[in-house]
Image (cartoon, rainbow, N blue to C red):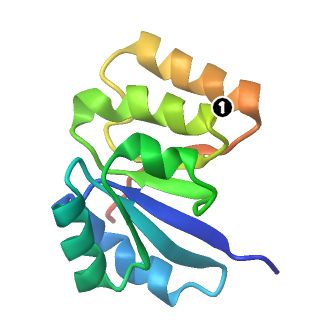
Amino acid sequence: MKKVRWGLLSTANINRRVIPAIHMSERGELTAVASRSLSSATAYADKWEIPHAFDSYEAMLNSDMVDAVYISLPNHLHAEWSIYALQHGKHVLCEKPFAITLDEVDAMIAAAQATGNVLAEAFMYRH
């Protein structure tokens, strides 16, 4: 079975909750991280044993090194980058909140439906 190649869209602190799960997964591998700064992305990649670092979100999303992305950007950027990722052939796991407005959510869903890619919100219930 082919592994899903994951990329991180930012070096946000919340990533530390997702990285171990991807590293332990038999069906996924963490292959890339993107930041607005190459030095930041490279340092983060070294720390978390991620093979590739990108100096822009576009560069990673335009590459063929990732199949899916975890988006942990500031909330107001979730819709914009989820849609961009979907339109560039990536599956998306977007940190909560999914988007700021209902119109943004509708646009995200439309992009997922148009591309056939998976779009999901990252949250969990506590009991």
Residue located at (43% from left, 40% from top): 58
**Residue 42, quarter of picture:** bottom left
Residue closer to the observer: 71 or 57: 57
Q: Is residue 93 visible?
A: no
Q: Is residue 21 visible?
A: yes
Q: Position of residue 59 (x, y in %)?
A: 45, 47
The residue at which mark 1 appears reads as: 112
Say which amino acid is labelled 1: Ala
Q: Residues within 10 Å of mark 1 (few under 14, many from 20)?
A: many
Rendered position, 47 above or below 86:
below
Residue closer to the observer: 86 or 93: 86
Dividing the image into 4 quarters, which one contains the C terminus? bottom left
Q: Secondary structure at mark 1?
A: helix
Whether residue 57 sits left or right of residue 83 in the image: it is left
**Residue 99, quarter of picture:** top left
Residue located at (53% from left, 65% from top): 6
**Residue 120, quarter of picture:** top right
Q: Position of residue 82 (x, y in %)?
A: 47, 35
Residue located at (51% from left, 46% from top): 61
Residue located at (47% from left, 61% from top): 7
